[in-house]
Amino acid sequence: MKHTFAIIDIETTGGSARMDKITEIGIVLHDGHQIIKTFSTLINPERSIPPFITGITGITDSMVAGAPKFYEIAKEVIEWTESSIFVAHNARFDYGFIAEEFRQLGYLFSKKTLCTVQMSRRAFPGLKSYSLGNLVKHFGIKLDNHHRALDDARATSEIFEKIVKSDYYTRVNPILSKSSMTEQKLPAHIDAKILDAIPDCCGVYYFLDEAGDFIYIGKSNQLRRRVYEHFSDNTERSAKLAHAVNKIEYTVTGNELAALLLESAEIKQYNPSFNKAQRRKEFKFAICQNGTFDNPEMPVVSSLLKVKENQELLKVFSTQDAAKKYLEFIQRECGLCACVRNQLNQNSCIHLRLGTCKAQEELPDVQDLITQMVTLLRRGFEKDGILVGPGRDTEEQFVAVIQKKQFLGMGYISKDLGFNNETELLDHIRIYAHHPEIPAIVRNYLKDHHDVKFVTMG
């Protein structure tokens, strides 16, 4: 089957698809051998363009003032990319912006994608850089107006032609062969049409075996692409997974945090066999319930990878130092003496000589203080409230409820529904078991993203 490729480049007001907007788009329609036709237009981003962006692109506020807004050229973009594979240099960036523009219009923009950065690394190994500018220079490609959409798209199309003709893609992965891209690498029980029907948006996907049991659960910002990637890896694990998969399901989440929380909750609930070796690398350390020395109930810091089955994980961290510091902070807040906190010999405790050491056996409240500390660690969140973010369409929003300092559950509500009626709100969420990994997921996500907000209840 012969393919057409929509080779696309965009210019934007910044680097965040959620926060910034497109100022120019260029599309080169290509048949894999030569350019068929081209399209380009400036786009009014409906906001000012930062001076440093103008310095890079040369696009000014006055240039886009009379340009069409994205919704006015959205139909043309759909028509130009219809039945074509989306190609771009750093495809995640360009595809992410365009998909977000359509999402805000209530339309799901879903395409197979190819990235000429990734493809160039395989086709032309050994280069110092695979940026568009460096590849253009390396191959002597003419590019007069770098960082203008159509010019960059044309340059990308020339690189794409060289990739198609390269030894790697001719010998190993002929890019114009549909079979090499899909059917030959799919599990025996999975038809390519099933995968093609999966939207390329944010969500969680599930691999099931013949008995209907979950054997792998994962999340991605591009569901279809990620599912395909599982079966394109030439590894023993990938082969075993492909052999075991009998059915594929998915859930669209609307935003990445919802996908992260759902993935974590579902893995804990179903314990898929192919997920067992996938401990989260960012949460290698934990504060555990079981203590040592003379305080068996005293929480201790331990490596998450070495935690024993009978140890309760109270809180997880990316580094051992962060875990130790947080534990010391909670212990101090609860009034526990240093000789308990550090599990030292009580004879070295200055408070023992002063008669103020709360680890002394004659002071009955030491166990109460430890119990209080464990309770605080179990809670995980500092405040009760609601996490609010983008929903699966423009009419709804995602909500996750934090109650009694623990994750209660999540779901979707209409944008017309407020947060004051807690009973009505709870009718729209699915309840999940709290796990110490959840606060860490939320904390890390909110630190680097701005699409989800925390709203205090009350």
Image: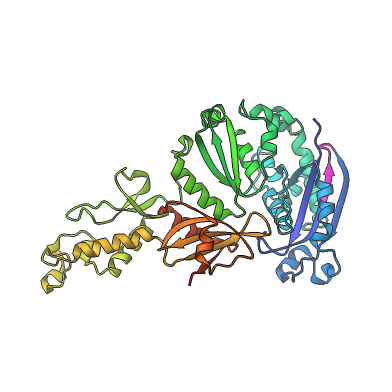
Farthest residue to the bottom: give it: 354
Using the rendered view, name the quadrant where residue 247 is placed.
top right
- For the residue pair 328 and 104, the one nearer the viewer reads as 104
Q: Position of residue 252 (x, y in %)?
A: 62, 48
Closer to the camera in the image, 80 or 370: 370
Horizontal side of residue 290 vs 192, given as left or right: left
**Residue 14 in picture, x, y percent from top left:** 69, 63
Q: Position of residue 227 (x, y in %)?
A: 61, 39
The residue at the point 55 percent across, 32 percent down is: 238
**Residue drawn at point x = 60 percent, y = 65 percent:** 417
Tell me which residue sits at (77%, 69%) in the image: 46
Magenta includes 379?
no
Find out whether residue 31 is within the magenta segment. Answer: yes
Relative placement, left or right, of 140 versus 443 is right
Part of the protein shown in magenta: 27-33
Q: On screen, 14 above or below 243?
A: below
